[in-house]
Image (cartoon, rainbow, N blue to C red):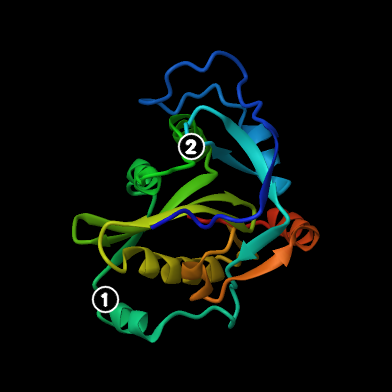
Amino acid sequence: MVAWGSGDRARIGSTVLFQGPMGNTTDSCMSQYDIPALIAGYSRGYFLMADETGNDLGWYCSRERTLIPLDDRFRYPKSLRRVLNQNRFTVAIDRAFRDVVEGCADRDTTWISEELKEIYWALHCAGYAHSFETWQGDHLAGGVLGIVIGGAFIGESMFYQIPDGSKVAMVKLVEHLRCRDFLLFDAQMMNPHLERFGAYNIRDRHYEVLLHRATQHRCSFC
């Protein structure tokens, strides 16, 4: 599975992410990343991406944003309905967060650099980044990686290891967000896969209004 999408985007600046020396964050939730600055960036509609070399991480924005509807506009293929009725998958939240990040980054060309992986981990430890996962027995089938701010779920990427794993994760995630009274499911940029679920584009100014409203809305993801 590719990242959410690839489209018209513009770089707006380099990251200012550290409060001090980076240190080693691999085995601990201790982090030198400036979490409030990161959340402020996402709350303004920006998103982090690295270049193809993985050495240049920066903030980006887009003239259009793609949303997954949380109302009756959400849809999915009939073939997936049969899969759902078979109950082949179970779902979990944050059971294998690092594995989901690695799965999302595991592709020929990735914008999820090693540094960005550690930023996701820092945001996870701070309660903002989450993985919504599908499992088949003890095997991770797929998952969605996202940032949660108030009533906004900002989808960063998704992947699968077992066919239909990410599709089921998408459907179950929408159900979860509805139950938790979320207002916004941001998928960032359109691709053909998302179109099958009723995804639609809005202009950046409209998105900024919806994002501000959603981030001020109190919700609990877990």
Mark 2 belongs to which amino acid?
A: Glu
Q: Measured from the top left, where is residue 14 in percent x and y? A: 66, 29
Residue lying at 69% horizontally and 53% vertically, measured from the top left: 215
2 or 1: tag closer to the N-terminus: 2
Residue drawn 46% across the image and 40% down it: 112
Residue ID at (49%, 69%): 192
Q: Amino acid type of disc 1?
A: Asn
- Which one is in front, 16 or 135? 16
Q: Is residue 129 above or below residue 142?
A: above
Report helix, strand or loop for mark 2: loop
User: Circle 1 is placed at which residue position?
Assistant: 87
Q: Position of residue 196 (x, y in %)?
A: 49, 76
Left/right placement of residue 125 relative to residue 98 reads right
Q: CA distance from mark 2 to mark 1?
A: 38 Å
Along the viewing direction, whichever of 168 and 108 lies nearer the viewer: 108
* Mark in front: 2 vs 1: 2
State left or right for residue 162 relative to residue 62.
Answer: left
Query: Dot 1 lies on which element?
Result: loop
Q: Where in the figure is residue 31, as x and y percent of width and height?
A: 51, 24
Q: Where does label 2 land, which residue? A: 52
Whether residue 144 is visible to the viewer of this picture, yes or no, is: no
Q: For the image shown, how many numbered marks are present on the structure?
A: 2
Relative to 20, say whether 143 is above or below: below
In screen coordinates, is 97 left or right of 12? left
In which quadrant of the rendered image does the N terminus lie?
A: bottom left
